[in-house]
Image: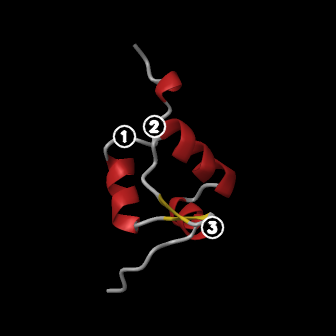
């Protein structure tokens, strides 16, 4: 299986979200990504683990 770094557009497509949401999640929800020069790159398994652990959940919408 190919293990390569994904771009913002590729990780957005993988998650079914817009690229603007990726940038928002990086800054506001500590989405795992690595900045290489000007570009953000993502390890698919790191992002999948982050999503499964609740990192992508909207904390404001959760019921108390």
Where residue 22 appears, as percent x and y from the top left, is 59, 52
Residue on which the image places disc 3: 9
Viewport quadrant of the N terminus: bottom left
- Do the residues bearing badges 2 and 1 touch, measured as CB atoms within 8 Å? yes
User: Looking at this rendering, what residue extends furthest in the bottom direction?
Assistant: 1
Circle 1 packing at 10 Å, graded few (<14), some (14-19), many (20+), is: few
Residue 3 picture quarter: bottom left
Residue 55 picture quarter: top left
Where residue 41 appears, as percent x and y from the top left, is 51, 66
User: Looking at this rendering, what residue extends furthest in the front direction?
Assistant: 37
How far apart marks 2 and 1 lie (CA) works out to 5 Å
Residue on which the image places disc 1: 54
How far apart marks 1 and 3 lie (CA) works out to 22 Å
Is 20 located above or below residue 28 in the figure?
below
Identify which residue is drawn at 55% across, 41% down: 27
How many numbered circles are shown?
3
Residue on which the image places disc 2: 57
Is 31 located above or below residue 45 in the figure?
above
Name the foreground residue: 63 vs 35. 35
Going from N to C along the chain, the mark reached first, 1 or 3, is 3
Identify which residue is drawn at 46% across, 65% down: 42
């Amino acid at each position: 299986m190919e293990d390569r770094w994904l771009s913002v557009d590729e990780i957005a497509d993988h998650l079914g979200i817009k690229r603007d949401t990726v940038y928002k999640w990086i800054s506001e929800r500590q989405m795992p990504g690595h900045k290489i020069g000007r570009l953000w790159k993502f390890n698919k398994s790191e992002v999948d683990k982050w999503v499964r652990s609740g990192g992508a959940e909207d904390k404001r919408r959760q019921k108390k």
